[in-house]
Amino acid sequence: MTESAKIIDFQSLTEKIGRFNLSNKTCLIPEMNRIGTHLLAAVFRGFGIHAKVMDTYKGLDLGKEYTSGKECYPCQITMGDILHFMKEEAKRLKDTFDPEDYIYFMPEADGPCRFGMYNKYQRIVLDSFPELSRLKIGSLTTRDGYSLAGIIDDSRVRDLRKMSYFSLVVGDILDRLLWRIRPYEKKAGLTDDFIERAMHVMEGAFERFGPAKDFNSVFKQLEAVIKEGKTIIDPGIPPKPLIGIVGEIYLRTHVHANQDVIRVLERYGAEVVNASIAEWVNYTSYDRFREAKIGFRLGLRQFRLGLMKAYLKDIIGFGGDLFYQEFRQKKTYKRIRSLIDLTEDHQVGHLEKTLIEKDLFNFDVGTEACLSIAGIVEYAREGYNGVVNVYPFTCMPSTTTSAVVRPLMSELGIPYLDTPYDSSFQPGREAAIRTFMYQANQHFKRHGRKEKK
């Protein structure tokens, strides 16, 4: 490769990845959590952004072809999703196909997790196709708490951000409604059909009421959904062992990637609660807020006024974000829990206190392990009958989680299961889950289960 080619490649990583205005573009969103992703796309459409959720997992063979196998599994899946979508669009549109009409949405995160490099690697792959080299990658980052500044007119960014977060909370609630109802449904298949319809109802609500920040109208639609969902529950079915799930955010929410692990657990007698999407968003705001406070104290000790001023601005900004998120989340769950007993999220500040109290890990280290380790401890305190850690094969934060909590769960006598995934199907997977659920049932018989709080 010539020096000029190296420079062009480097420029591609800076010029074709970033925060771009989405006016007159089609924003392509990878499907991670099905419901939350579709509700987010609906919010975007309500604000005039042509957002589309791409079909997922149909391009996995392409994803594996253009990766080495050393990448994180979600990188392979999302790589295949975008290549498959663009290939199908080129077939459909033929001569009118123009990659510049699209912006592929792929956020990133700080730290040692490989997620921070997805969009860079995918940029290199896209550039290897001359016809796709003009496709830009829109990226938001944890460095600024996933700010949406720059993607639409500045005067509407704040409202878009508020409704986007609200849509994630509502998506979490619909997921938890699904997991609350399906183990107790009157007839097999009723819940899946209901939730699919409910998702489309809420898409319409967000698209229609989102731009005006009409939270009450969205709530009314959600309450109607909850009331209908409750009619599917057979009150004659007794409570089942309660299983908590933690792990890497993509794998634990992408049903194809985790081989529908929640449904498999339900098949063997579980009721499941998965960690939420909103929890991760709260964590990014909390961690930036926490870093700003540490930086401000350092500036105060050194009496560096410029540094103090910069960190004070971050404290106000990220602190405000966190306050709004917790306010909106708490208000939403309070309203919904008056209708049905769904599990609320833990506050991230409480999770940090749990880690400090138990001296298990530290937020200074970062990564999703902070949430998973503390979340498992909280599951144990709240009387769950078992915990499952779902993650990509070789995932560092989740492997760290396993190393920390496995001996703790053994000491507490609470069943624990690691379920690492790649594109293969492990022959012993069903046996491991059956064994785990036998242990969870034994725990349930001895200790009962928690009442949701």
Image (cartoon, grey):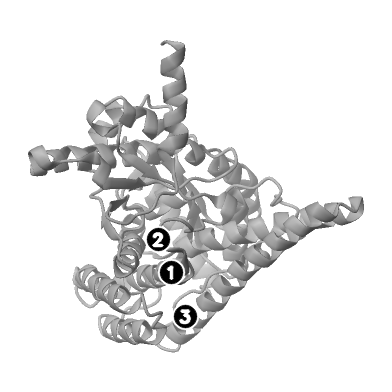
In the rendered structure, find residue 332 and report the number of the disc placed on it: 3
Label 2: few (<14), some (14–19) or many (≥20) C-alpha neighbours in 10 Å: some
- Left or right of residue 210, residue 116 in this image: right
Disc 1 to disc 3, C-alpha distance: 23 Å
Q: Report the front residue among 245 and 138.
A: 138
Circles 3 and 2, Cβ within 8 Å, touching? The answer is: no
Disc 3 from disc 2: Cα separation? 27 Å
Q: Which amino acid type corresponds to the residue marked 3 in the rendered image?
A: Thr
| Residue in the image at 84% along x and 53% along y | 299
Q: Quadrant of the C terminus?
A: bottom right
Mark 3 Cα-neighbour bin, 10 Å: few <14, some 14–19, many ≥20: some
For the point 68% across and 45% down, which residue is it? 365
Disc sitting over residue 152 in the figure = 2
Q: Amino acid at mark 2?
A: Ile
Query: Is residue 402 or residue 240 the one in the foreground?
Result: 402
Q: Are marks 2 and 1 in contact (CB under 8 Å)?
A: yes
Image quadrant for the N terminus? Answer: top left
Question: What is the three-letter code of the residue carrying label 1?
Answer: Arg
> Circle 1 is placed at which residue position?
156
Residue 347 picture location, percent across and down: 61, 69
